[in-house]
Image: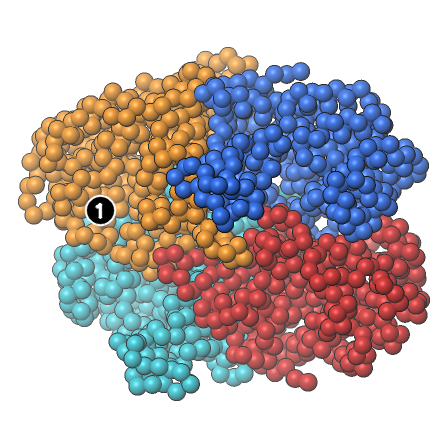
Chain colours: A blue, B cyan, C orange, D red
Amino acid sequence: MSGPSIGVAVIGAGMAGRAHAAAYRAAGMVDGPELPDVRLVAVADLNARQAVIAARRFGYLRAERDWESVAVAPDIDVVSVVVANHLHREIVEGLLAEGKHVLCEKPLANTVAEAESMAAAARSAPGQQAMVGFSYRRTPAVALARQMVADGAIGTVRQVRAQYLQDWLADEKSPLTWRLDKERAGSGALGDVGAHIVDAVEFVTGQQVAGVSGLLETFVKQRPMPGERAAGTSIGGTAGVGYGPVTVDDAAVFFGRTEGGALATFEATRFATGRKNGMGIEVNGSAGSFFFDFESMNELHVYDGTVPARDAGFRRILVTEPDHPYLSGWWPPGHVLGYEHTFTHEVADFLSDIGSDRDPSPSFREGLQVQRVLDAVERSSAAESRWTPIPTS
Amino acid sequence: MSGPSIGVAVIGAGMAGRAHAAAYRAAGMVDGPELPDVRLVAVADLNARQAVIAARRFGYLRAERDWESVAVAPDIDVVSVVVANHLHREIVEGLLAEGKHVLCEKPLANTVAEAESMAAAARSAPGQQAMVGFSYRRTPAVALARQMVADGAIGTVRQVRAQYLQDWLADEKSPLTWRLDKERAGSGALGDVGAHIVDAVEFVTGQQVAGVSGLLETFVKQRPMPGERAAGTSIGGTAGVGYGPVTVDDAAVFFGRTEGGALATFEATRFATGRKNGMGIEVNGSAGSFFFDFESMNELHVYDGTVPARDAGFRRILVTEPDHPYLSGWWPPGHVLGYEHTFTHEVADFLSDIGSDRDPSPSFREGLQVQRVLDAVERSSAAESRWTPIPTS
Amino acid sequence: MSGPSIGVAVIGAGMAGRAHAAAYRAAGMVDGPELPDVRLVAVADLNARQAVIAARRFGYLRAERDWESVAVAPDIDVVSVVVANHLHREIVEGLLAEGKHVLCEKPLANTVAEAESMAAAARSAPGQQAMVGFSYRRTPAVALARQMVADGAIGTVRQVRAQYLQDWLADEKSPLTWRLDKERAGSGALGDVGAHIVDAVEFVTGQQVAGVSGLLETFVKQRPMPGERAAGTSIGGTAGVGYGPVTVDDAAVFFGRTEGGALATFEATRFATGRKNGMGIEVNGSAGSFFFDFESMNELHVYDGTVPARDAGFRRILVTEPDHPYLSGWWPPGHVLGYEHTFTHEVADFLSDIGSDRDPSPSFREGLQVQRVLDAVERSSAAESRWTPIPTS
Amino acid sequence: MSGPSIGVAVIGAGMAGRAHAAAYRAAGMVDGPELPDVRLVAVADLNARQAVIAARRFGYLRAERDWESVAVAPDIDVVSVVVANHLHREIVEGLLAEGKHVLCEKPLANTVAEAESMAAAARSAPGQQAMVGFSYRRTPAVALARQMVADGAIGTVRQVRAQYLQDWLADEKSPLTWRLDKERAGSGALGDVGAHIVDAVEFVTGQQVAGVSGLLETFVKQRPMPGERAAGTSIGGTAGVGYGPVTVDDAAVFFGRTEGGALATFEATRFATGRKNGMGIEVNGSAGSFFFDFESMNELHVYDGTVPARDAGFRRILVTEPDHPYLSGWWPPGHVLGYEHTFTHEVADFLSDIGSDRDPSPSFREGLQVQRVLDAVERSSAAESRWTPIPTS
């Protein structure tokens, strides 16, 4: 570490880059283990103008165009990588090689091979911390759910249902962005939002997914090239001038078993009209249950199966009490948190891990495990949905 | 009683008359104290055709035009009175004089004087049971709420908020029916639905309302005469041809204190656009709270204030378990009940009381107490909303 | 038909038998096409005492012990069959042979072969009506959902998620009843409640399921014999004295595609702690969505995707308006219905079909289609969850 | 103004002071009218240590002990005043006299006289902006509600019900803090949270409250002095050693009429066990309705009364779309905001007003109007709840 405070850089100045920047700035609001002081040193983006705007808005000392400048800068200790997935491996390994702590956005990579390489690189840099950005873990209600499972409050986990429902592609005229191109995006709903719920299930239950059977679907196979929305037409199934093929999944459904024998179902989609950010999870155990939906992120609904039937019911816990995870430093009860707090908590945890020289979670190894589940879903879908075990390392 | 089974008549063949008929027929479904067998003997209505249709639909032995025929019939033991409020006193007292058990629809009467006369008549007929039809008491969730308060589960009752929100008059072009005429209807929202929530508060808390401050409002002061909706116009505040004055309240708001020192607020309205039958009540005690809304009649939401803050929240109890009030004879858990079950339970309770020679509740005396609260609200509203104590008998 | 009114019998005097009896008696409350008058003639049950009690409670003219007496009785026109599934085929075919109209409880049978036989028998009795008792179709909110899909209100159906969540087996000490024995029950959660959601999906979308991939699970493999709950123990995985094997599924998960290309997921379970009768369905279309949960059976939540984003949201429709399916004859808006109304509506539809000589739906052929889906799920589960097309007849 | 960027100070380093500091720092995230750049110059607090900690956490240039240092500092343009209410007048007037723009926390003052003095001071400083911190106005859902009323979407406003329900005093053993002392706090629930809902009603409806009838209640009249909780006892109504009197209201209920003739009910309480920050408002108009609860701050439920009954229902609008107030610069749809965003939006509006030399709202004059309503409630409560008109200036 370069000095008494920690120098931070963010590579990527888009939406997620803003979330990381705001999080580093606000991390000090989270009470708990003393956090190191943070200096926002650099933001890097190929789009130089965007980097400059971000630098000014968040108070970074400088804007950069390339990640290599960040990698070699002596005043930078910690780097968030928030660029397109297919660029993760090269940048992250480059940063690790230069001694940086790295927080890499999810999914860890586009392929299992890339993820394996990155996990190996992290293993080879033992003094440096490497974490994957599964930020939904840091939703206080999700962290509380994990506590409850770990404490045995719901008994043996038997069933899990996890969903990530969005609708931003439901309109078949919306254009063919890079996110719909397998080369660049890796996969569609599965990798983008499905990765979150695989991690959430493994985090909350404390169990890995052991095997899956899945089905990927692309509802709209041709879309207008960006900027050509008005002109083209896909009527009749053949694309008009200015249409291109969608090469990723619009939706993915799969079920599986965890290593502990629980039955789990998953659905990731961008076609659930009316569902904006419906990241939901329900877990049924032998002694209780809970459910959660990110659209109501401050609520966890918990059922205690040991209560007499006359009094039993799902309790709507408003997860805003000082005793709740991450809450001691925020506002009075009932004064709710928002999406960006998941990033603030993530960064606070990461900085605290770095300060204490403690391995962060989710580690790259955990990110690799998620990648293997996603890969198994794809392989199952390509093989008549046949049951596909997840390899263990 | 005329024999081993009970002969029943219903005076009034409108909507509420149908509810009573169906209830007498279904009462045997309610398990519990052995109920006497029921014979549907007669239905009476000034509208002879409606009486005949009802007789056929429900299997009454005969249809009558006047209540006197019911009063003198030797094969009738129990009579429901479900006619316009201003007719209650005469009919009920006539039936009591002839030895019948009487179930009188709410509110007991249009005035305190009438209610006092009826309560006296009931007192003078000690072997006969007389009950007021505050059917919402028989909602399982409401009955469970009362149990909880009585058991001390929420501690000392401190605050109550009760609402009865409907919207069927929100359209200012809807016509001037008899319900908007003070001569016939007695009052508007206050007597019609406000009576229900006054009773519900007294039932659930076990405390009488001791004083109130209130305000009545008539938003739409002129309405088209029935059948003239299209022709007239009320623009400019002066009624067109075919308009007549609304002489009852459209909405009533009041607050009060119970004899035990709780603070209670009440609102009854027919102008809450979007609220169809929003009969709701929330009670806050020193150790817990609950809330209820009839539009979700199978749910009671209960907060246990003695649970640690980390785990506390409103529990949504689905009131469909065998251990819940009135539920043992119905369906498996989660198989919900409907509005008409409140009548079935009411009638089953009444028949059970008659079979056991037990005083029913709400008695006419309780009905009179509600009448006194409504009267105090009107008097307060007429006197600059000044605080008005409720007389006790 | 034997005369101006219709003679009715119910074979089976258990819980579902009570629901049918109450439904025949109340069917006249449902407005709409003029219904024939109904006489409750006979109830039959091997348990003679139960038959006598039912006869008295509902006013049947007589109680019988065997179904054959019902089959040959000249004063009976319509028969509900509400006995264990493995008895359906023999009784239903016997009744059809004697000229009765038959309403058979779901699932139609325990096997595809039985269901095929029954569908053939119904086809060979063209003047007689035969219907399967998928009563959830008659929930007003579900019927409204179908109307909306049929009217194009949500556009092309793309995704469906259907669940039937119960929890009455979550306690691993609850005993080994006949429902957990494959010989008698046919299957577990799949056939019992899974059948309902397969029918509901096909009804609401108007599309048949074309193929599936599934997984059945039995969480608790040994249970105490009835009456031995306290004595036995299953600790260590080996059953104690008085334990027997569970031979049906505790939970079933599957996904599939409809003939129209929609992606559908299904889950049926008796282990969803806290979920009492969570029969839920969500449909996402290109222009809108809806969701429904039977625990809130009077609500349909509808999203109109054509509304500008600023104003769009799921509308909670309280399905109690006179314009809603089945509602014109019941109570005012907001005065909710209950579980038993689904039977009342079913019977009213069936009687109306009989009166009009119109083919009822769901027909036995539709019941057979559901059976084929369930069978494909079982076969897929036995074959590594491999994709399994549904045969068409 | 001292230069191209704006120098900011916050007087008060407690919870609300942190909210203001975070808001000034994050204001640049809110898109819209170009905001001036902000420098966090000074934080002042009598508690010097707290000031120093705040300065370090948020990056203020310096910490101060007294407000006068802020008032005279030439590098400070804008000051937030977030100290106890009885100190507002002196500090705010001192700052205005020195040429500062002032954002004063709510309520504006403890008395009408103080508020009048402050409003006069603001009027006498025309080039300087003065705003009251009714931050709930800046909740996107509340701002959307106001838009809808202003656009006529719900027609004529007829009824309003507003609540602010908290429960932090429900425990009668919680200690006697300064907030329960009338000298320092001014009033209890009425001034603290009742002020918010009076402002919210006036903001959302665009109408002032014209008259009220109210009742204040103190449920627990003696409380342990701070630090003596374990020792004392209030059993028997007489306070033990170490108890002191509560001199403010625990709860306030009132109803009123707006200048436009709408009927409004209000309730503010700290005794609603289970309600943590239940700031709720429902408005019923002739053409529609909406309701809101801050515990679900990202949702506005809107009923459009012009839709046919078959399709009508409350729409749950997730107020996270780019078209919604304050949302264009934040996250994608469904990625919810939290409590602190209400401050961020407030500060962004204030800075934008300053940058554009535009009068902010709520102005001190609007704050004075709220004060007059609160004062009328107190006077009514002291006079048998008699109707009390609100004076207009």
Position of the C terminus of chain A by quadrant: top right
Secondary structure under tag 1 reads helix
Q: Is residue D370 left or right of residue B254?
A: right
Q: Which residue is located at x 48 percent, y 31 percent?
A: A217
| Label 1 CA crowd tier, 10 Å (few <14, some 14–19, many 20+) | many
Percent position of residue D294, x then y: 62, 57
Visible residue check, residue D276: yes
Q: Is residue B101 above or below residue C175?
A: below
Q: Which residue is mark 1?
A: C348
- The quarter holding residue D216 reads bottom right
Q: Which residue is located at x 79 percent, y 58 percent?
A: D24
Percent position of residue C71, x then y: 12, 30
Q: Which residue is located at x 6 percent, y 36 percent?
A: C74
Between A156 and B221, the residue placed more toward the observer is: B221
Between A265 and B76, the residue placed more toward the observer is: A265
Q: Which residue is located at x 30 percent, y 37 percent?
A: C134
Percent position of residue B81, x then y: 27, 65
Q: Name the amino acid type tagged 1.
A: Ala
Visible residue check, residue B197: no
- The quarter holding residue B275 reads bottom left
Percent position of residue B27, x then y: 29, 50
Q: Is residue A367 left or right of residue A78?
A: left
- The quarter holding residue D106 reads bottom right
| Chain of residue at mark 1 | C
Position of the N terminus of chain A by quadrant: top right
